[in-house]
Image: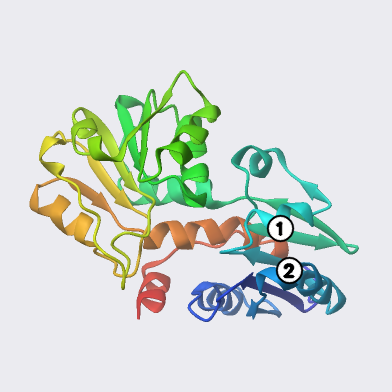
Amino acid sequence: MSNAFIKTAVIGHPIGHSKSPLIHSHWLEKHELSGSYEAIDVSVDNLKQGVADIIKNGFSGFNVTIPHKISIMAICDEIDGLATTIGAVNTVTIKNGMLYGTNTDGFGFVENIKRSASDFDFTKGKAVVLGAGGAANAVIYALLQEGVPEIFITNRTKEKAQKLTAFNPEKIKAIDWALRHDVLEHANLIINTTSLGMAGNPPLEINLRAAPAHALVADIVYAPLMTDLLTRAKACKLHTVTGIGMLLHQARPGFELWNGVLPEVTEELEQLVLT
């Protein structure tokens, strides 16, 4: 492997809260690689120039977070089929000044469940997705890839949920937000992709009593780690998966693209990020 110093980063606005520098710096140190990973604040109206500066400064790639995951697509020279289908890019590789975009959010979501609930079977019943923002796109695509037979999406703005049915109109249905409690009956998987329950935001109001005993409840929010939704799911004796694993696992493919090593998610890393 080359000893060249590899510069990578994450861009977003705001970006000070990002845990990505902690994650990537940990892996660089663990694998004794020569490189750096930094957080770069790039405002919405400065995206094109911000990316040009990153290329000029010799970076090998960067992650993309809110609010640039969609707008970065217009700047990429090439976008793979996965990111094109999802409609968002969160990982960019730079080669000879050209930008190559992909999306690792779906991988991160599925890997988190597979590692945290190893006996869970995606094909055993319907999934209920709460929210229809950017993360929902990747989650829904990943669920289809894992063979989930039926997906119900509910969002406070139903029109946004209806747009996501285009992934597979035969398997995906959009329902009114008011019916989110009722649709939990016979659910195999319940996923919160909204920011409800995140520190500083209101909790997600949903009645889990209709969910069957075998249902798995996943929340992509990781601050706090045990959201109100997961706390109530535990009280109902349902299986739960926290959001920290998705954050960590989605970072792995990008690190491999830039550094040639696929890193592992360890308890040490989880604790580092949660501290």
Q: Is residue 153 above or below residue 244?
A: above
Q: Report x, y in % for residue 178.
A: 24, 39
Q: Secondary structure at mark 2?
A: helix
Quadrant (top left, top right, bottom left, bottom right) of the N terminus: bottom right
| Total numbered labels | 2
In the image: residue 67, left or right of residue 45: left
In the image: residue 139, left or right of residue 226: right
Using the rendered view, name the quadrant where residue 172 is placed. top left
Query: In terms of depth relative to the viewer, which is nearer, 95 or 191?
Result: 191
Tell me if residue 119 can be seen. Answer: no
Tell me if residue 208 can be seen. Answer: yes
- Gap between marks 2 and 1 measured at Cα: 8 Å
Q: Which label number is shown at residue 47? A: 2
Q: Which label number is shown at residue 16? A: none
Residue, far right: 96
Residue identifier under label 1: 72
In the image: residue 246, left or right of residue 235: right
Q: Report x, y in % for residue 132.
A: 44, 45
Q: Secondary structure at mark 1?
A: helix
Q: Amino acid at mark 2?
A: Leu
Q: Amino acid at mark 1?
A: Ile
Query: In terms of depth relative to the viewer, which is nearer, 237 or 163?
Result: 163
Give the mark, 2 or 1, whose residue is nearer the N terminus.
2
| Residue at 32%, 66% in the rendered image | 198
**What colour scheme has been applied to the protein in the rendered image?**
rainbow
Q: Report x, y in % for residue 261.
A: 64, 62
The reply to whether the C-beta atoms of the residues labelled 2 and 1 are less than 8 Å apart is yes
| Residue at 21%, 56% in the rendered image | 230
Label 2 Cα crowd, 10 Å radius (few <14 / some 14-19 / many 20+): some
Q: Report x, y in % for residue 97.
A: 89, 64
| Residue at 53%, 51% in the rendered image | 105
Q: Is residue 236 above or below residue 266?
A: above
